[in-house]
Image (tube, rainbow, N blue to C red):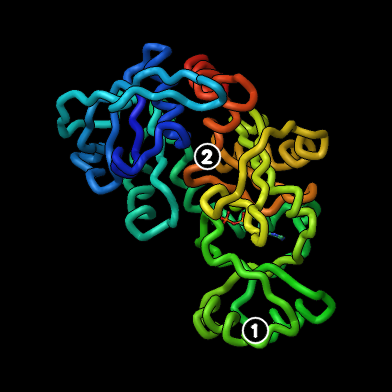
Amino acid sequence: MQHVFIIDPLERLDPTHDTSVALMEAACTLGHRVWVTTMESLSLVGGEVWAWLTPIVVFPTTLDGGRWQVRSPWYELGGGFFGSLTPMQTVWMRPDPPVTSAYLFATYLLDYLDPKTTRVINSPKGLRAANEKVYAMQFRDLIPQTIVTARREQILDFLQNRERVVMKPLDGKGGEGILLLRRDDPNLNSLMELATHRGTTPVMVQEFLPAIKDGDKRVLLFAGQPLAAINRVPQSGEFRGNMAAGGRAIAATITPRDREICASLAPILQFDGLYFVGIDIIGGYLTEVNVTSPTGIREMDRFDGTRLGEQIMAQISSQDF
Ligand SMILES: Nc1ncnc2c1ncn2[C@@H]1O[C@H](COP(=O)(O)OP(=O)(O)O)[C@@H](O)[C@H]1O
Ligand SMILES: [Mg+2]
């Protein structure tokens, strides 16, 4: 099989943490061929999608005392060339969010790949359809009480019978810009103005889930099926569980409730071509559907002794999705 990974520059990737590296490593281990490229080089030439393609071999990692051991450098590159993506079976669209206009434009170019022969994970249409925060709003029975609005009055109304709520930018990631609002906070008005850019940009406002003290669970799904889970526990004095905000990853199992959530999402994810997705669950409530560059494989493999990347690659090889 031949895979292209559209990623951020390699030097920014952490081979002991980044899921893109785990996936590339898995493909190499299984004898697939892998090329890397970045969004900027994507082009349309004669109606075909082309890019600057650099062959890569990612060396195998090992686990030693619960830590990933990687060779330094952890990959070897071959000579790059400007070539067509048409012969590829899989194109992995995995630059880190936020979704910028450059990111959106890349999805428009990827629309020109024939999905019958080249599968883009995740599908460009799905990536455009699914804002990571707002997408969860369609699963009314699974999410905590939530509104999306730029209107100060609506936010205050939502705060009316609640002591505290969480306010989130719609294009955030890694806990960036997540705020806890309290009715009696002297900065309340200012925080709303800042977050909504003076009432012009909608934000998500959600009931505060005290269960966050026990963690924010990440479940990774491939083709609608839950693969594995980890829990991320906020550090003391913090309510954000994101690893990027200092949250501690610990082992977790997939509970019947998690399975119920995944089963509700699965048909809609499949319809939207969202094959590889990471959902966030706090206290049994769905809070986020991460579609742009979901992560967690390295931590899950570390805790569970699995090789999820190889599992996914094997499923792709057998066209079983
Ligand atoms: N409703 C909520 N109640 C309590 N904590 C929350 C809530 N929503 C989010 N958080 C905290 O904020 C973090 C980030 O929220 P999330 O919606 O996953 O956005 P992102 O991960 O994209 O920044 C979560 O890991 C969690 O710790
Ligand atoms: Mg999250």
Q: Nearer the viewer, residue 214 or 306?
A: 214
* Quadrant into which the C terminus falls: top right
Neighbor class of circle 1 (other Cα within 10 Å; few <14, some 14-19, many 20+) is some
- 275 w.r.t. 192: above or below: above
Q: Quadrant of residue 135?
A: bottom right
User: Left or right: where does residue 308 sit relative to residue 215?
Assistant: left
- Residue for badge 2: 295
Amino acid type shown at disc 2? Thr
Circle 1 — which element?
helix
Percent from the top left, x then y, of residue 59? 35, 19
- Residue for badge 1: 188
User: Left or right: where does residue 114 sit relative to residue 265?
Assistant: left
Q: Earlier in the sequence, mark 1 or mark 2?
A: 1
Q: Nearer the viewer, residue 111 or 216?
A: 216
Q: Is residue 1 visible?
A: no
- 119 w.r.t. 257: above or below: above
Question: Is the CB atom of the residue marked by disc 2 within 8 angstroms of ligand 2's nearest atom?
Answer: no
Q: Is residue 41 visible?
A: yes
User: Left or right: where does residue 143 sit relative to residue 235?
Assistant: right
Percent from the top left, x then y, of residue 1? 38, 17
Seen at 66% across and 61% down, the residue is: 237
Seen at 55% across and 47% down, the residue is: 243
Q: Nearer the viewer, residue 176 or 107?
A: 176
Percent from the top left, x then y, of residue 309? 51, 24
Circle 2 — which element?
loop
What is the spatial separation of the Cα atoms under label 1 and label 2, in whole angstroms? 33 Å
Amino acid type shown at disc 1? Leu
Percent from the top left, x then y, of residue 25? 40, 22
- Count of numbered tags: 2
Res. 39 mark:
none
